[in-house]
Image (tube, helix red, strand yellow):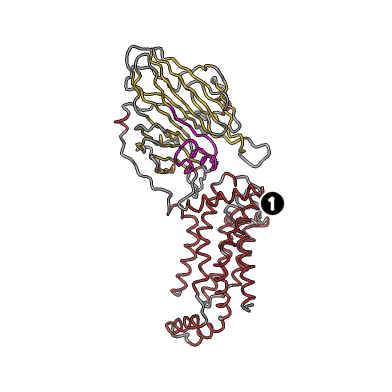
Amino acid sequence: MKEETKGLVWAVLLSIAIIYIVNWIFPATPVQTVPNSAQEVQPATISENTENTAQPLPESEILAQDARLEIDTPALSGSIRLKGARLDSLKLKKYKQTLESDSPDVVLLAPQGSQDSYFAQLGWLSADSTLNLPNADSLWRTRGSNKLTPETPVVLEWDNGQGLKFVRTISVDENYLFEISQAVENNTDKTITLYPYGLLSRHYDYKAQNAQAVVHQGVSAVVDGTLKELRYSSIDDSEPETFDFQEGWAGFSDRYWFTALILENNEPSVFKVSNNGQDTYQVDYRGSALSVEPSAIASNKLRLFAGAKDIKLLDKYTDELNIKKLDLAVDFGWYYFLTKPFFYILTFLYNLIGNMGWAILLFAAILRLLMFPIANKSFESMSKMKKLQPKVMALQTQYKDNKALLQQATLELYRREKINPASGCLPLFIQIPVFFSLYKVLNIALEIRHAPFIGWIKDLSAPDPLTISVWSHIPLPSLLDIGVWPILMGLTMWIQQKLNPAPVNKDQARMFALMPFIFTLMLGHFASGLVIYWTLNNLLSIVQQKAIMRKNGVN
């Protein structure tokens, strides 16, 4: 194989691979482990029984075992287990698990012992082992309302029988933010020192979930203004990660859902991320010591986010409640400066039109309009190059045995005709970051999840479901399970390729001829919204390029 052909082959292979590996090559922020100073802050450890035991039971059966306090908001339904005062049942009212009309709500939190145990728990620690503190088995009683709503906070009490009364006040807004205040009333004759803690525990088999690499799924945290991200695969069961901080948040991040403990106490605290080796992961925090004088009350407050990654809502919490960088719970990627503006433009167009598919198409048209002058110059250059093809081929025949002279003569020809061969690549280089940014948006934006277009496209965040039926009777790999929109995209790419000057080198010509087929296979498993965008972008390019060719007298 000739050297120039080898280079082309490698370029094609790398261009395909880059779409799949870009998020590994450019991680959002490298995680730096902070030296563990937890022992300096906290002489005790959190020792809750957070491991799944025995065979998982149905969630409904577990929920019926203990007294519970109902949660009912416009966005959430669920309950708090009074035993342990544990928030372990939460569903998202606004989001369904599937596209079916009778689909159940998305389940976020589930009780320990169920298939996908996921819960939040708060409490107190002490270096005094004789002190009776509330734990996972302590039965709390309610004072006042027995139902948590945005209008009715709830108050829980527990007495340790040693002169300490623990009071917990829980409130929730109309969306996904809980505010939890823990107070300790000291009715003894001595000063008591306690340390507040909170934890999120989750049983999650990430290998079985087939998590998408393009979207971060695992632990996300902002520690004193710095983003930290840990994938489940990197959380070691023998060496927990610890982060010293004074202000921040940490929790578990899914593609569309998120939980986090949020602290703003400006006191030395520590986050710890651990894995028990049985697919149970835990994020916990331990706060600074609180001294409670006799007949005094000490308190600690934190917030808990548990809900959907609504980007506008996260921005609102950041602005109004000063929860720093909460929007980074959404994995915008290293090209944040493009991804987030693209999201806001798309949602603006969606609110204007009422359909996300048409919003994507209008977005594509706006981008083409903005790139119109650059694309015009590129297409004019390519048209002139196509017009010169006979002269270039004549030079190749004349200097077929002398590559150096051929290159020199070709460049001289382009110079005389005032053609820049590289100008045809400029729109492609501009399109690459646009493509990746839109690809990211369509994978992270909650507004695109289950968003329909027209015809058979019911979910723009999923691949085109309408595949060529004849293939289902042939034992072909799933790679060839291609929908109609990817085929249309490949067809427009083929037409666009025919408008460009053909490579003179036969090997290169063969490789270029395969490109539409390769990209059809590759994009066939991408979000249909991205494929629809790319198809319209190709169509607009074809129209513009055809007009330029006609202007320059090129067929």
Per the rendered image, the range of residues in magenta is 301-327
Residue 31 percent coordinates (x, y):
38, 45
**Where 161 falls versus 175 (above or below)?**
above
- Work out whether residue 42 or residue 314 is closer to the camera in this orientation and state it: 314
Query: Going by the image, does 485 lie left or right of 45?
Result: right
Give the residue type at disc 1.
Answer: Ile
Q: Residues within 10 Å of mark 1 (few under 14, many from 20)?
A: few
Q: Residue furthest front?
A: 320
Read off the residue under disc 1. 454
**Tally of numbered discs:** 1
Q: Residue at x 50, y 20 (%)?
A: 155
Question: Residue 317 colored magenta?
Answer: yes
The quarter holding residue 187 reads top left
Q: Residue at x 39, y 43 (%)?
A: 226
**Where 244 falls versus 552 (above or below)?**
above
Residue 11 percent coordinates (x, y):
47, 66
Q: Is residue 205 visible to us here?
A: no
**Where 316 falls versus 427 (above or below)?**
above
